[in-house]
Image: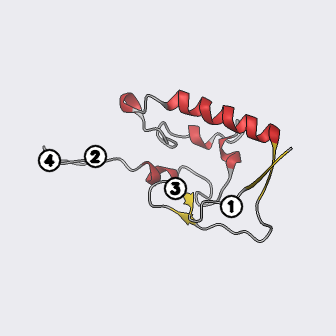
Amino acid sequence: GYFIPKGTRVTAMPLANHYNPDLWTAPETFDPDRFSDERAEDKTHRYAWMPFGGGVHKCIGLYFGQMEVKTIMHHLLLTHEWSVPASYTWQLDYTTLPVPRDGLPVRLKKL
């Protein structure tokens, strides 16, 4: 353990866990299969994956946020064709959460 003096401000960095090679196979590679039932890398440690925080202080919008994203994505996947330019390569910005630096130019065409 570590001794932390009284009054010291402490913060958690979920991104450090999200890129920890002890918890994830090739953590810097985009690999949605790491969350599959077969691999379940997000279940290897209680705090391996915590985009909404963890413990008693996790975000109260956790379940609502997940359902909202699933509902919107379900609708968009059923009603649109998705594409990116063939020559597109992405560069990630890791300032807070990993996001494409250019916003990811996805083209949606209504079916």
Q: CA distance from mark 1 to mark 2?
A: 45 Å
Q: Which residue in the protein does label 2 denote?
A: 1
Q: Horizontal and vertical percent for residue 15?
A: 46, 52
Q: Is residue 60 above or below residue 94?
A: above
Q: Residue furthest bottom?
A: 87
Query: In the rendered view, does 17 fall on the left or right side of 12?
Result: right
Q: Horizontal and vertical percent for residue 21?
A: 54, 56
User: Which of label 1 and label 2 is nearer to you?
Assistant: 1
> Which secondary structure lies at badge 1?
loop
In the image shown, does 2 or 71 lie closer to the viewer? Answer: 71
Q: Is residue 92 above or below residue 53?
A: below
Determine whether label 3 and label 2 are within 8 Å by CB: no
Give the quarter of the image for residue 57.
Answer: top left
Name the quadrant of the C terminus. top right
Which residue shows up at 45% across the image and 55% down it?
A: 96
User: Which of label 4 and label 2 is nearer to you?
Assistant: 4
> Which secondary structure lies at badge 4?
loop
Determine whether label 3 and label 1 are within 8 Å by CB: no
Q: Earlier in the sequence, mark 3 or mark 1?
A: 3
User: Which of label 3 and label 1 is nearer to you?
Assistant: 1
Q: Which residue in the protein does label 1 denote?
A: 105
Q: Which residue in the protein does label 4 denote?
A: 5
Kind of residue at badge 2? Gly
Kind of residue at badge 1? Pro
- Other residues around mark 1 within 10 Å, as few (<14) / some (14–19) / many (≥20): few
> Which secondary structure lies at badge 2?
loop
Q: Which residue in the protein does label 3 denote?
A: 19
